Image: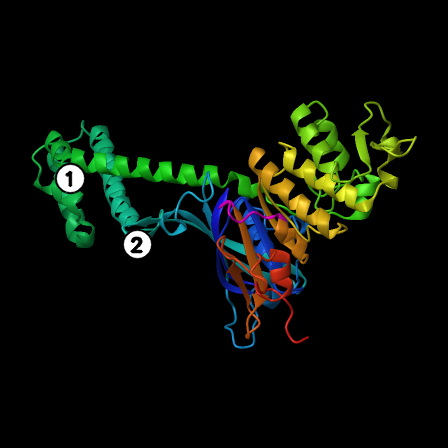
Amino acid sequence: MIEAIRIRNYKSVVDMKIRLGQVNVFIGENGSGKSNILEAITMASGAEKGDLSKSSLVSHGVRIIDDTELMSSNFIDGKDDKDIVIDIYPTSQVGIENPKDMPRQQYSISPYIVDNSFIKFKLNKNKIIINEGQEIEIGNSELDKYFNEKKEKKEKIDLAKQTIESIREHDFDKFKEYMSVLAEDKPSDADQISKTFLSASSFDDIINNISILISDEESKEMNKYEEAKNNILAVIDDELQPLKEFVIFSPENTALRNFYKEKQIEPLGINGEGLLRTLKSLRLKHDAITDIEDALSLFGWYDSFSIPENLSDIEDKIYIKDKYLKSDFDQRSANEGFLFILFYMALIVSENTPKIFAIDNIETSLNPKLCTKLMEVITVLSKKYGKQVLLTTHNPSILDGLDLKDDTNKLFAVSRNYNGQTIIKKINKDKNFKKADGKKMKFSEAFLRGYIGGLPKGF
């Protein structure tokens, strides 16, 4: 899971911090930057798995602009040549820890153009922890430098010991004479170890003297620090694993209706490709199928659906039963909104789909009342199946299905400030809007009245 994110210099987002929940809804006007927030997470996902190629980013939902100035923030009064910086605060359970006290993974991404044609990205990754209120970059801190110096010193000592063991048969006095000449010729090289050679009376004396240059206590400290550092790195890497699968889904009617086999990613493509394969994988999972059936029952005409076991490649289809019709029909004749909800449910209940994902414009093709009920279903099933979901919408009816009294649900109003930069406002769970008669106002009405924000200005 992702506890929090910080996005800097990505498209319309200059600097934004977001504390996430399990289900997160972003509402705002067209072009406010909602999708840019999701894309920034996708950029972090690509950086984490080491693939920032254009083809991979596009297949995971990023709208690539072949212009480096437009990939990073490009405001009139802003600075040029800024890196995109994305901080991810991972955790095993969202809402448990304060992000400012948590370790984080930082990705610094620099877009550049190759041969005046192809956009590429340079990447720098840093893991950062907080110690006594101070940020420490793991592997590049003063503590790392201190122990690295100790480590280098110990390696020199071990090498010196090996050298002594290999020349024990030689004359010690001649060896000492050689070391004296070497120290005179290169006095800067006469460090502690070579000085120990000069003051020794025998090879054994040298070994004994250089052994105490790094004490047993210092060796223990080095080992303890290395172990602690590796443990922290392992925990962060483990908790970042779900981020690698992050995808922005934008299902399309044609892909859902024709069950395209060609898809950009598995198990589901960003436009809905691969839905039949995912449904087939769920055929024997009774609990998951029941949850899908329950969600589809939001349609008053719906009775059931079935997935035939033996179909040729050109016959891939599901059969849908309308309680009022004599004959079944397949997905090509199904209602568009039905197919969208079938896709969303398969996405949530399948163990093969990403643990963290986004859906852009969740309300597409859905009746407003259906949007409200869909949100109620999503908040329940996301918990049941351990999915973290980020949704964008323009439809205020979505808000009425989001229970903000549950701390794992988050609502954000997204807009642009007077400089054109994307800004975000979290709507608190204790926010109550009242009508003139004192009755509680629905979030959808409060949004349309402009009480929440995220509405177009100027008309």
Q: How packed is label 2: few (under 14 Cα within 10 Å), some, or many (20 or more)?
A: few
Q: Earlier in the sequence, mark 1 or mark 2?
A: 2
Check disc 2 and give the amino acid type.
Gln
Which residue occupies 51% across, 45% down? 406
The C terminus is located in which quarter? bottom right
Residue that mark 2 sits on: 134
Q: Is residue 337 left or right of residue 100?
A: right
Position of 318 relative to 30 (above/below): above
Q: Secondary structure at mark 1?
A: loop
Badge 2 element: strand
Residue 164 appears in the picture as rendered = yes
Q: Answer with the quarter of the image where residue 232 lies.
A: top left
* Amino acid at the residue labelled 1: Leu
- The reply to whether the magenta stretch includes residue 34 is no
Of residues 346 and 89, the one nearer the viewer is 346
Report the number of discs. 2
- Asked if residue 53 shows in the view, the reply is no
At x 59%, y 58%, the residue is 441
Image coords of residue 436 (percent x, y)? 59, 65
The percent position of residue 378, horizontal first and vertical second, equals: 63, 41
Q: Which mark is residue 213?
A: 1
